[in-house]
C-alpha cells in the first residue's frame, strides 16, 4: 500500500500514545518508510526505543539534538516526507498548530512542512468539546488538515464520550485511501496560473490587483496531492511553493502569456486562477516619474487575453477559467465561459465577505457549458481546489477509486 511513501508519525502526550506502536507497525508492514517525532510528554507514556525499533529509524524528540541524518533536521525532514500523521493529537498540539507555535521538534516540523497533515485527536471528552479545541479544529480543517475521528466510547479517565483516538487500523486505512485513491491524475500534466500580474509604470511603480495567489497555490497543492505533474506559473507573491510542484515566476501579463503559450502543447490541462491585468501602461518610463503638481494621465493598452487565446488553440486540452465578478455573477461568468471556450468556469462573487481576493476562503460555483451548475458554501481555498480536482477527473474521464 505505502511502497515508496515516507510518513512522519508524530506522537504527543496522551494515554493513547501506546496505540502509536501498533500504527507504526501496520504502516511498516505495508512498506511505508516511517519516521517518528515524539513530544517530551509522549516519552512519559511510551519509550522512544519501542517506537524506534518498530519504525527502524531514529526517533526525534529534541529540537537541538545531534543531527541523526541531515543538518537542520526539522527542515530537511519536513521537505523529505510525503505526509505527517499526528496520533494521538492532544488538545495542546492542536492549539500549537492552530497558532503556529514551534517550540519543539514535532511542532517545528508541522510548521515547516507543506505536505498533507493528518491529526487523530485524543483527549477527555470535556476537553474535546471545549470551544477552544473546537475552534482550533475548525482552523486546522479550514487550512486543509485532515482530522481523523475521534471515536466515542470508554475513556481512560473513566468517562464515556467523544475523544477516544481512532483505532490504528482506521488511521492507516485513511492514509491508504489518501495515497492509493489519490493518484487519480498520475501521468497528467497540469499548468496552473496564480496571483496578480504587475504592469510596470516606471522602475518603482506598477499597476496591480488584490490577488494574493492563494487560490492558485491551493489548486496546485490539490493537484499535486492527486499525483498530477503540476507546473505553477506564478505572478509575484510571498507564498511558499507547495511541495512537489514546479514553480515558474513571472511578473507581467505578457510574460504570463509567453510562459503559458510556450507550454500549452505539453500539458493536458490549464487552470487560469491568476488575476491577469487586462491593460498595461503604453509606455514604461525608464526613470522614476516625477510629480510636477499637475494632473497626470496614463495611457493604457490592452493585454492579450491568455485564456481566450488558449480557447482558440485548444485541441484535446481541458481549460478551466475563473470569473471574478462584482455584479451579475452568473450571466458574466457564463458569457466568459462561452467567449473563452473553457470546459469549466469557477465563478466567484468577490464582493462577498470570505470570498475572492486575499482571504483564505472562497465561495464559488462551478459552471459547465452543458448548463450544469454546482454551488458551494464558504470553504477553504484548499477545499475548493480539491473539489475542482474531482471535477477535473470527470472532465478527463479518469476513474476515481475510493
Ligand atoms: O489570489 P487570491 O487572493 O486567492 O484570489 C483568488 C482570485 C479572486 C484571484 C481567483 O479566485 C479568481 O477569480 N481568479 C481570476 C481573476 C480574474 O482575472 O478574473 P476575470 O474574470 O477578469 O478573468 C476571467 C478569466 O480569464 C480568468 O481565468 C483569468 O485568469 C483569465 N484572463 C483574464 C484576463 C487576461 N488578460 N487573460 C486571462 O487569461
Image: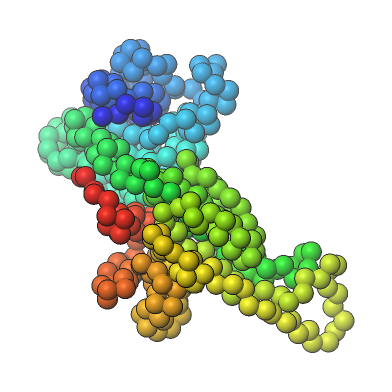
361 and 45: which is toward the camera: 361
48 and 134: which is toward the camera: 48
The x and y percentages for residue 90 are 32, 36
Q: In the displayed structure, would residue 361 be above or below residue 139? A: below
Q: Quadrant of residue 64?
A: top right
The x and y percentages for residue 286 are 84, 67
> Residue at 26% of width from left, 42% of height from top?
181
> Residue at 41% of width from left, 54% of height from top?
268
User: Across the whole image, how many numbered discs are drawn on residues?
Assistant: 0
The x and y percentages for residue 59 are 41, 19
Which color mode does the image show?
rainbow
Q: Quadrant of residue 196?
A: bottom right
Q: Quadrant of the C terminus?
A: top left
Q: Is residue 165 visible?
A: no
The x and y percentages for residue 75 are 53, 31
Taking the image as shown, residue 169 lies to the left or right of residue 292, namely left
Q: Quadrant of residue 212?
A: bottom right
> Residue at 31% of width from left, 73% of height from top?
369
Q: In the displayed structure, would residue 253 be above or below residue 166? A: below
Q: Is residue 51 visible?
A: yes
Q: Quadrant of the N terminus?
A: top left
Q: In the displayed structure, would residue 46 be above or below residue 336? A: above
> Residue at 38% of width from left, 56% of height from top?
385
Q: Residue furthest bottom?
A: 295
Amino acid at each position: 500500500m505505502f511502497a515508496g511513501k515516507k510518513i512522519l508519525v508524530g506522537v504527543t502526550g496522551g494515554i493513547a500514545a501506546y496505540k502509536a506502536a501498533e500504527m507504526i507497525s501496520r504502516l511498516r508492514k505495508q512498506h511505508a518508510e516511517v519516521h517518528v517525532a515524539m513530544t517530551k510528554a509522549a516519552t512519559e507514556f511510551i519509550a522512544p526505543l519501542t517506537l524506534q525499533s518498530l519504525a527502524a529509524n531514529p526517533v526525534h524528540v529534541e529540537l537541538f539534538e545531534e543531527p541523526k541524518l541531515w543538518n537542520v533536521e526539522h527542515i530537511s525532514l519536513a521537505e523529505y516526507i510525503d505526509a505527517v500523521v499526528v496520533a494521538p493529537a492532544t488538545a495542546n498540539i492542536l492549539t500549537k498548530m492552530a497558532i503556529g507555535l514551534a517550540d519543539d521538534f514535532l511542532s517545528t516540523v508541522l510548521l515547516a512542512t507543506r505536505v498533507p497533515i493528518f491529526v487523530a485527536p485524543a483527549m477527555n471528552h470535556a476537553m474535546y468539546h471545549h470551544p477552544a479545541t473546537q475552534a482550533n479544529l475548525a482552523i486546522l480543517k479550514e487550512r486543509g488538515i485532515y482530522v481523523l475521528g475521534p471515536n466515542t466510547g470508554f475513556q481512560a479517565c473513566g468517562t464515556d464520550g467523544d475523544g477516544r483516538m481512532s483505532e490504528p487500523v482506521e488511521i492507516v486505512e485513511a492514509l491508504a485511501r489518501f495515497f492509493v485513491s489519490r493518484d487519480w491524475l498520475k501521468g497528467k500534466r497540469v499548468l496552473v496560473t496564480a496571483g496578480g500580474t504587475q504592469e510596470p509604470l516606471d522602475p518603482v511603480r506598477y499597476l496591480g490587483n488584490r490577488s494574493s495567489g492563494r487560490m492558485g497555490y491551493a489548486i496546485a497543492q490539490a493537484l499535486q496531492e492527486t499525483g498530477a505533474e503540476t507546473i505553477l506559473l506564478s505572478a509575484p507573491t510571498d507564498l511558499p511553493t507547495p511541495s512537489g510542484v514546479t514553480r515558474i515566476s513571472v511578473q507581467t501579463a505578457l510574460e504570463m502569456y509567453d510562459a503559458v503559450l510556450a507550454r500549452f502543447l505539453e500539458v493536458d490541462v490549464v487552470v487560469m486562477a491568476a488575476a491577469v491585468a487586462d491593460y498595461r501602461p503604453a509606455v514604461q518610463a525608464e526613470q522614476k516619474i516625477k510629480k510636477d503638481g499637475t494632473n497626470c494621465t496614463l495611457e493604457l493598452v490592452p493585454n492579450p487575453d491568455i485564456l481566450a487565446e488558449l480557447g482558440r488553440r485548444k485541441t484535446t486540452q481541458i481549460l478551466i477559467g475563473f470569473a471574478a465578478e462584482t455584479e451579475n455573477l452568473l450571466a458574466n461568468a457564463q458569457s466568459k465561459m462561452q467567449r473563452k471556450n473553457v470546459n469549466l468556469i469557477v465563478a466567484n462573487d468577490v464582493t462577498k465577505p470570505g470570498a475572492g481576493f486575499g482571504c483564505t476562503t472562497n465561495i464559488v460555483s462551478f459552471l459547465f457549458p452543458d448548463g450544469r451548475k454546482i454551488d458551494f458554501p464558504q470553504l477553504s481555498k484548499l477545499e475548493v481546489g480539491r473539489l475542482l480536482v474531482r471535477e477535473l477527473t470527470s472532465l478527463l474521464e479518469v476513474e476515481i477509486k475510493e
